[in-house]
């Protein structure tokens, strides 16, 4: 039953994707179509009224597909905008399969954002995982396949935990499937299970290792999509259900620092950026945990800003990978003469993520930190500030410096191929860069989108002074210790070790001791079970044949023999019957006479 | 244009470095002046009000800690050869 005329933006993308295979040939028609579908979805979100739409009754449940309120609107806005930017960026990829998978992936995210109950949420939650994995597989390397399967397994596990939580909650509440504040003051088992399902997608340690693993291996444009949707949809779900859940504060702070530590060690630019997603999402998780209006506003604003600047950074480093074929610091360097435009866009992303005044991060990240200070969580606020120094250190300094400046580690081939990427990629980066600066300069644009009224002013003299001191003295530290940060040709072990290396040991264990034990059991069974069984079976078979069958067959043969003889007597000749009767009569008479 | 702009500073490295130190100094002095002008009502804690250049020190120490602790952690065996998982 439709309450009102309302088009789900996810439906636009799904139906739009279904027509994509008809437009496989590169050409203007294909490009216009690819542009129009996400544009239509974006305009649809902009024009959307608030309210509840598309409620369907199914069995005993009423399923809500369209809950449009302040919280879902800000996320729907940024997701469709990023879908448009990502699609423009990926327009020059061959074929349409990547865009097909990406649109379904965005549709999953939008479905979660606008849903009003856990069943619809779960449906779209799984759509996200099962469509985004193709963005890894389409990279086409041998290791992409394995990475994709790991990604899928981890998310299937998370989905099952989420489903278990939903089921337990359904039972405990007597059939309630509505998705809203879950009651963080009296958490029970299902609260934690649903939370684990959500924070796995938000990449909270120790459930985070899938993120750098998959995002570092995804296709160039696939990573641009992936960096935006999964984690931020999880933040939406947490903000909707778990605002004020205390345990999220320390988890968020740990995330923020964890990402920073691993980013120091990372040699691959895109994996470094992936670790910084963990770090940045940590701010949002902490914001949700603090749970005040300022903190929730901060988490939403930071998610909004983050999607744009992280998308921009992934587009910048993706361009380097796309043009040169590598994204490792130890194989790059000194490219500012070859890729200057990409450098400027990446720098804008770097300054935005580092929260420089006039860039987007400055007006969003500070809201979360301010809410921490306001709530007297000094340790959390100071540690988050420390992590923000780390953000500038890596994303604002290390990434641009070791790709575009620093020691030139490029091979001749890399150097030859390096130049600014095709126009569509530059346009996509320009749009994202514009929004990064626009949000930073004109705060009402973002603040008016937030779910609660904003009374926060980022541009005070003191806040500018505070930020500039932290950032510039971080830069001083960077240049003083630059030798320590020189790229090393290594990878860093993370918790995915447990299911990558330990699974090999598990396979060895399964192949050797377990298999041997199984073989031994089979042998014992054969000797002690099968052999006596077969012997006794053979005996009974013999007995059956010779004993039982002998008796039965013998009886039958005897009866057959006599009946043969009896048959001879009955030949139908009346004279013989009369002679038998006469004989019989004679015998009877003789017998009577002798008595 | 972008390349020329960058090269302008790269060709004058000494001047650029001096300029950077000047900018650093400017923000510390700015912080001290804010303290004198009583413009620190947005400060969160007392240490920010009474410790001139607190955030400058905080930024530098944070950066140093992050680099050294991370590298120490990495050399505990976390950083390993690139083909580690390929076997």
Image: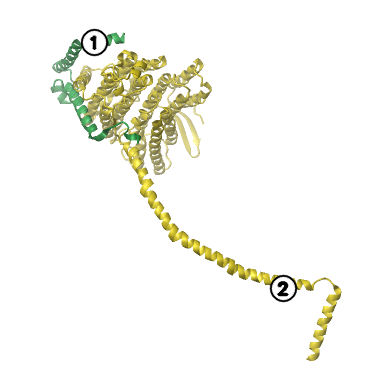
Chain colours: A yellow, B green
> Is A446 in front, or is A430?
A430
A537 horizontally vs A114: left or right: right
Residue A463 on image: x %, y %: 22, 19
Can you tell which quarter of the image residue B28 is in? top left
Mark 2 vs mark 1: give the one in front: 2
Pointer 2: residues within 10 angstroms few (<14), some, or many (20+)? few
Badge 2: chain ID: A
Q: Which residue is mark 1?
A: B9
Q: Which residue lies most toward the front here?
A: A412
> Is A15 in front, or is A538?
A538
A90 horizontally vs A376: left or right: right
Reply above or below: A322 against A588: above
Instruction: Residue at 31%, 24% (x, y): give it.
Output: A328
Label annotation for residue A501: none
> Which secondary structure lies at badge 1?
helix
Pointer 1: residues within 10 angstroms few (<14), some, or many (20+)? few
Q: Which residue is mark 2?
A: A562
């Amino acid at each position: 039953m439709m309450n009102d005329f309302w088009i789900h933006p996810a439906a636009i993308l799904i139906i739009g994707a279904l027509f994509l295979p008809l437009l496989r040939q590169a050409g203007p028609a294909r490009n216009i179509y690819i542009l129009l579908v996400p544009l239509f979805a974006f305009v649809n979100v902009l024009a959307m009224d608030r309210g509840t739409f598309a409620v369907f009754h199914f069995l005993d449940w009423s399923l809500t597909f369209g809950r449009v309120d302040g919280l879902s609107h800000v996320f729907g806005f940024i997701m469709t905008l990023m879908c448009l930017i990502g699609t423009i960026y990926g327009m020059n990829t061959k074929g349409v399969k990547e865009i097909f998978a990406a649109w379904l992936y965005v549709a999953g995210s939008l479905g979660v954002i606008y849903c009003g109950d856990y069943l619809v949420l779960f449906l779209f939650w799984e759509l996200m995982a099962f469509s985004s994995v193709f963005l890894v597989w389409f990279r086409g390397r041998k290791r992409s396949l394995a990475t994709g399967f790991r990604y899928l397994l981890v998310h299937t596990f998370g989905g099952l935990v989420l489903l278990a939580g939903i089921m337990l909650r359904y039972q405990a509440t007597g059939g309630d499937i509505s998705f809203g504040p879950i009651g963080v003051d009296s958490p029970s088992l299902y609260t934690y299970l649903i939370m684990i399902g959500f924070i796995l997608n938000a990449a909270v340690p120790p459930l985070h290792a899938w993120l750098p693993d998959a995002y570092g291996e995804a296709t160039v444009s696939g990573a641009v999509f992936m960096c935006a949707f999964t984690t931020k949809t999880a933040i939406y779900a947490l903000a909707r259900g778990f605002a004020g859940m205390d345990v999220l504060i320390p988890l968020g702070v740990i995330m923020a620092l964890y990402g920073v530590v691993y980013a120091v060690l990372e040699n691959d630019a895109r994996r470094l950026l992936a670790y910084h997603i963990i770090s940045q999402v940590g701010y949002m998780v902490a914001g949700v945990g603090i749970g005040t209006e300022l903190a929730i506003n901060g988490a939403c604003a930071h998610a909004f800003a983050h999607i744009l600047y992280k998308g921009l950074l992934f587009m910048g480093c993706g361009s380097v990978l796309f043009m040169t074929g590598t994204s490792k610091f130890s194989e790059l360097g000194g490219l500012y003469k070859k890729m200057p435009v990409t450098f400027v866009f990446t720098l804008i992303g770097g300054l935005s993520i580092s929260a420089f005044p006039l860039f987007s991060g400055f007006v969003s990240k500070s809201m979360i930190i301010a809410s921490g200070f306001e709530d007297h969580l000094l340790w959390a606020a100071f540690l988050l500030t420390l992590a923000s120094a780390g953000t500038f250190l890596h994303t604002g300094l290390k990434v641009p410096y070791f790709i575009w400046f620093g020691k030139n580690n490029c091979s001749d081939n890399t150097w030859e191929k390096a130049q600014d990427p095709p126009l569509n990629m530059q346009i996509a980066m320009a749009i994202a860069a514009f929004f990064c600066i626009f949000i930073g300069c004109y705060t009402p644009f973002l603040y008016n989108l937030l779910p609660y009224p904003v009374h926060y002013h980022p541009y005070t003299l003191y806040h500018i002074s505070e930020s500039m001191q932290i950032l510039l003295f971080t830069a001083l530290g960077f240049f003083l210790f630059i030798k320590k940060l020189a790229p090393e040709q290594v990878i860093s072990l993370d918790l995915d070790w447990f299911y990558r290396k330990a699974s090999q040991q598990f396979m060895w264990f399964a192949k050797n001791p377990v298999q041997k034990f199984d073989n031994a059991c089979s042998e014992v069974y054969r000797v002690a079970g099968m052999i006596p069984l077969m012997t006794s079976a053979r005996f009974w078979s013999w007995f059956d044949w010779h004993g039982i069958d002998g008796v039965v067959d013998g009886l039958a043969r005897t009866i057959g023999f006599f009946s043969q003889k009896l048959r001879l007597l009955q030949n139908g000749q009346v004279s013989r019957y009369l002679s038998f009767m006469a004989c019989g009569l004679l015998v009877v008479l003789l017998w009577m006479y002798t008595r | 244009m972008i390349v020329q702009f960058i090269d302008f500073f790269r060709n004058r490295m000494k001047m650029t470095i001096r300029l950077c130190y000047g900018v650093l100094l400017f923000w510390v002095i700015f912080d001290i002046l804010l303290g004198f002008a009583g413009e620190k009502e947005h400060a969160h804690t007392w240490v920010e009000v009474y410790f001139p250049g607190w955030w400058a020190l905080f930024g530098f120490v944070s950066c140093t800690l992050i680099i050294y602790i991370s590298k120490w952690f990495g050399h505990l065996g976390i950083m390993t050869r690139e083909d580690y998982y390929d076997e």
